[in-house]
Amino acid sequence: CDKGKYGANCSNVCSVHCAGKDNSCNHVNGSCDLGCKVGYLPPLCKDTCDKGKYGANCSNVCSVHCAGKDNSCNHVNGSCDLGCKVGYLPHLCKDKCANGYYGDGCKTKCSEHCAGQNNSCHHVSGTCDMGCDPGYSDSSCEKSCDKGKYGANCSNVCSVHCAGKDNSCNHVNGSCDLGCKVGYLPPFCIDKCANGYYGDGCKKKCSEHCAGQNNSCHHVSGTCDMGCDPGYLGSLCEKLCDRGKYGVNCSNTCSVHCDGHDSSCNHVNGSCDLGCKVGYLPPLCKDKCPEGQFGSECAETCSVHCAGPADQCNFKTGECDAGCELGYKPPTCHDGII
């Protein structure tokens, strides 16, 4: 038979789907000399691949992820006739969506709030593989936590000490949206002010006149926990005792024997501002000079020549109570009679 013909009386024509430049075939049975073009059934290469097959010698199977009832695909290149099932890459539909994508045609990006370095998600549904970043919920991690919740899986509750009507806080880290109620530490407002501080934002220092080693005070009001140091009054212990008073709770009265017209004294310890009146013992000036002493600050000593026991004399003037021994001049008995 001439080239390109075969069979009885050489009346049959070799298939146009025979491989090769001139589509040559066996002159007897018509089988293509170089096999079939891609997508056709050997040996005669006249028919396309059976349904569900494609490619060279129809040896490849259409992907089970081709859309449609019978997963049909192009007999030559295997591209799915009806596209891919959700979650698979066109056109052969054999591979899942690339990492970070999902859905029909793999066109949708996984949520940027998927946990993990690559924000990976399920290739079909978009459900985040490692759950959501803190502050997000729902399978796709696109929904912020409900008001009042925050953190991983939205499982944490905003502090009841967040300022505002509804105690709202940041859905990711829990920092209070409107700051803290008075007396609590920003930004999360869970803890009271540190010891020694109080008030809005915990910026105020407790009074240095709060009693106790640490000057501690109430975290909200600043009221000193253990009251005031001696000499101070008021809830914040910032007010000095009124004139004429001193000590704890300003409950003590300055001595009437303090010198000066108003008998003023130190508001803390009661020591007289101007010293004592003559005959009284500093610093509080409440007691007379001890026996045997007299005068300003009790600095002078009764004469040894006072008559009577123990050199007794007047605590103010030094006059001997029982007069002088013989030979000494009253009233103080210091000088002898000439």
Image (cartoon, rainbow, N blue to C red):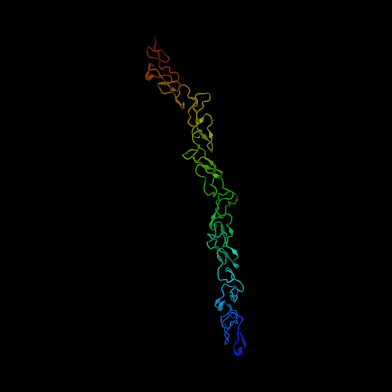
**Image-based side of 140 in relation to 320, left or right:** right
Q: As displayed, is residue 261 above or below residue 159?
A: above
Q: Nearer the viewer, residue 253 or 132?
A: 132
Q: Quadrant of residue 171?
A: bottom right
Instruction: Decide if residue 46 is on the left or right side of residue 226.
Output: right
Residue furthest bottom as drawn? 9
Q: Position of residue 236 (x, y in %)?
A: 53, 38
Question: Hey, which residue is sitting farthest top in the picture?
Answer: 338
Q: Is residue 244 above or below residue 227?
A: above
Report the quarter where the C terminus lies.
top left
Position of residue 128 relative to residue 226, above or below, is below
Image quarter of the N terminus: bottom right
Name the one closer to the observer, 87 or 284. Answer: 87
- Quadrant for residue 291, please give it: top left
Viewer-closest of 92 and 214? 92
Which residue sits at x=37%, y=20%? Answer: 310
In the rendering, at what x and y percent does residue 243 appear?
53, 29
